[in-house]
Image (tube, rainbow, N blue to C red):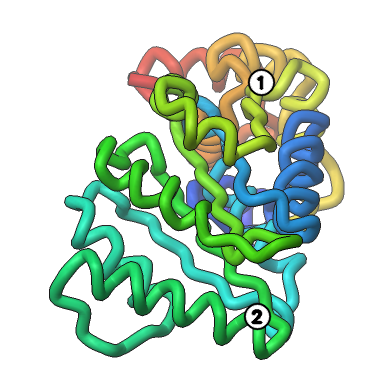
């Protein structure tokens, strides 16, 4: 609705995990570096935690873009709130195994056979689980058993878990699993500097070179969104809409206050 008014080619603050709009803050860069290290060096597993809206799903997509499909056989699970056997069946499905598995024993056997085939084909088996804080204890135990599948010099699978902060407590309470996930990182919200850069970055990606937001407006956005990308997106998107409807030349603190007072962050 406001593309032409603000001279954008596309909407700059959509809340979808589009890797093109991934802003590499210090925290996000560190998380990406650790994930790629864990995967490429076959460290067994990695855990990235973060509050709601901090960009974990987008981070996973950016990570996947760095991996060659010729080298990695990748399974991605986005809804892991399943019973143990259903979870293993989902692992099989995401790894492209179409054979029916009607018991946990058969699931584990088929997963193991898949991992061995990948080794023979010189491919790495990678399982990424988003929203991993939803995993039940029995499913976490199955992940521990999968990480027991090793050769003399390597794991047969790398498991990456991304989830909300309670994921860390779940992992820590399971010592044997905790020890098999050596790479851990907590994704922090942006500070003020990164929030300002993020707002400008997304506008440039959407086709506008100059910043439609005043410095004071961006400071108000940071104060209210607390550096959480999803909240920043919500505020900026609505501010651009309201600014367009009022024929504003730039987004001012007053526009931001109006958006907040209308309940944008509720």
Tell us which disc is closer to us: 1 or 2.
2
Q: Residues within 10 Å of mark 1 (few under 14, many from 20)?
A: some
Q: Say whether residue 130 is left or right of residue 243.
A: left
Point 45% across, 81% down: residue: 113
Point 55% across, 37% down: residue: 233
From what the image shows, is residue 211 above or below residue 63? above
* SS for callout 2: helix
From what the image shows, is residue 222 above or below residue 13? above
- Residue with the mark numbered 2: 119
The residue furthest right is 209
The residue closer to the viewer here, 187 or 114, is 114
The residue closer to the viewer here, 265 or 112, is 112
From what the image shows, is residue 79 above or below residue 26? below
Residue 153 seen in the current view: yes
- Give the quadrant of residue 3: bottom right
Residue 242 seen in the current view: no
The residue closer to the viewer here, 19 or 127, is 127
Q: Position of residue 174 (x, y in %)?
A: 42, 27
The residue furthest left is 102
* SS for callout 1: loop
If the image is split into quadrants, where does the C terminus sit?
Answer: top left
Point 48% across, 33% down: residue: 176
Earlier sequence position, callout 1 versus callout 2: 2
- Residue with the mark numbered 1: 252
Q: Position of residue 10 (x, y in %)?
A: 62, 62
The residue closer to the viewer here, 147 or 134, is 147
């Amino acid at each position: 609705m406001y593309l032409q008014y603000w001279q954008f080619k596309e909407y700059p603050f959509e809340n979808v995990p589009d890797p093109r709009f991934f802003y590499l803050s210090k925290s996000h860069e560190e998380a990406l570096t650790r994930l790629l290290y864990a995967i490429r060096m076959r460290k067994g597993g990695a855990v990235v935690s973060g509050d709601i809206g901090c960009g974990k799903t987008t981070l996973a997509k950016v990570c996947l873009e760095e991996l060659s499909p010729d080298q990695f056989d990748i399974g991605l699970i986005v809804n892991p709130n399943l019973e143990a056997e259903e979870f293993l069946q989902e692992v099989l499905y995401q790894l492209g195994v179409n054979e029916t598995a009607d018991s946990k024993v058969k699931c584990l056997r088929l997963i193991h056979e898949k991992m061995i085939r990948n080794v023979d084909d010189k491919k790495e088996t990678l399982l990424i689980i988003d929203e991993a804080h939803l995993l039940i204890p029995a499913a976490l135990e199955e992940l521990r058993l999968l990480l027991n599948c090793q050769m003399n010099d390597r794991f047969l699978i790398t498991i990456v878990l991304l989830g909300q902060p309670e994921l860390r407590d779940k992992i820590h309470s399971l010592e044997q699993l905790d020890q098999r996930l050596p790479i851990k990182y907590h994704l922090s919200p942006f500070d003020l500097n990164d929030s300002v850069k993020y707002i400008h970055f997304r506008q440039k990606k959407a086709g506008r070179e100059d910043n439609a937001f005043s410095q004071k407006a961006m400071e108000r956005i940071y104060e209210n969104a607390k550096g959480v990308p999803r909240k920043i997106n919500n505020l900026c998107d609505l501010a651009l809409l309201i600014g367009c409807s009022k024929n504003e030349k730039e987004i001012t603190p007053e526009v931001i206050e109006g958006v907040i007072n209308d309940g944008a962050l509720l």
